[in-house]
Image (cartoon, helix red, strand yellow):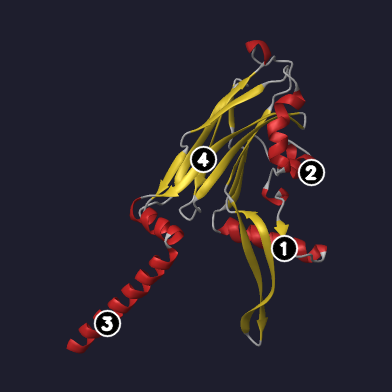
Amino acid sequence: MRRLLLLALAPLLMGQAKPRLVPDVSQRDIEIAYSFTGAELLLFGAILYPGGRAPGQDEKPADIVVVVKGPTQSVQVREKEKVAGIWVNAERMRYRSAPSFYAIASSRPIDRIVDERTRAIYELGVESLQLSPASSAAPEVQTRFDKGLEDLRARAGLYYQAPGAVEITDGVLYRARLKIPARVPIGKFTAETFLIRDGRVLAAAVRPIEIRKSGFERFVAHSADHYSVLYGLIAVALSILFGWGAGAVWKRF
């Protein structure tokens, strides 16, 4: 909430003499069908400078950082421990809210663009995400579980960073490509673009993206959400029917 408020107030806080961003995305709506194997999202736009001028040669080049973030969700992380040669669940930690998807692209490595404090304020980078544990824990335990959650989602392709993936042309036009994996969750996403110079955020803008199921998958998901009792009864009936059918076929052989 704090970060979204900063984004909304950014133009007022920065004044009218500062440049502003005009961003867009190649797809505002991404539909997931049974054959969905992932998608590539193109994020592009322009930097508008006061008076319509182009940046001067004596000005320090600005950087662009693009963040695509999925809806937050509650998640539980379990730590496994080997006991008597068997891996068993040991400690666990629940997070009230964690981004279901997080991808960041930048014109340079993010640690060369802004300092640690600014990264934490705007959540620029996987290690700067403001995770919300449901219970308190020792700092070293909290850090261990945070890294564990980040590693799990990174291996699934749901958290990743792409330094150098943003291309800036003539200091005005920019573009970046980010991959949307096949296992991406559905929901309302945001594409946030930041214009940064000398470690300061000069402008910021947000564009919405929606990822949803289509076809039969959408019908099943809608039925499960809105008619849960009927959906459960039908699922049980189909299980019994298929079980009975398999038994009848087996008896014939």
Q: Looking at the picture, which amino acid does disc 4 mark?
A: Ile
Q: Which residue is mark 2?
A: 116
CA distance separating discs 1 and 3: 45 Å
Q: Position of residue 152 (x, y in %)?
A: 60, 61
Q: Looking at the picture, which amino acid does disc 1 mark?
A: Ala
Q: Secondary structure at mark 3?
A: helix
Q: Secondary structure at mark 1?
A: loop
The image quadrant that residue 200 belongs to is top right
Q: Position of residue 190 (x, y in %)?
A: 57, 41
* Res. 134 mark: 1
Q: Position of residue 97 (x, y in %)?
A: 66, 56
Q: Which residue is mark 4?
A: 209
Category of crowding for the residue at label 4, using alpha-carbon neighbours closer than 10 angstroms: few (below 14), some (14–19), many (at least 20):
many
Q: Nearer the viewer, mark 2 or mark 4?
A: 4
Earlier along the polypeptide chain: callout 2 or callout 4?
A: 2
Earlier along the polypeptide chain: callout 1 or callout 3?
A: 1
Q: Is residue 27 visible?
A: yes
- Work out which quarter of the rendered image holds the N terminus and state it: top right
Q: Looking at this view, is 204 or 243 the one in front?
A: 243
Q: Which residue is mark 3?
A: 244
Q: Looking at the picture, which amino acid does disc 3 mark?
A: Trp
Give above or below for 209 relative to 134. Answer: above
Q: Nearer the viewer, mark 2 or mark 1?
A: 1
CA distance separating discs 2 and 4: 28 Å
Give above or below for 2 relative to 82. Answer: above
CA distance separating discs 2 and 3: 62 Å
Residue at x 31%, y 73% (from the top left corner):
238
CA distance separating discs 4 and 1: 28 Å
* Res. 165 mark: none
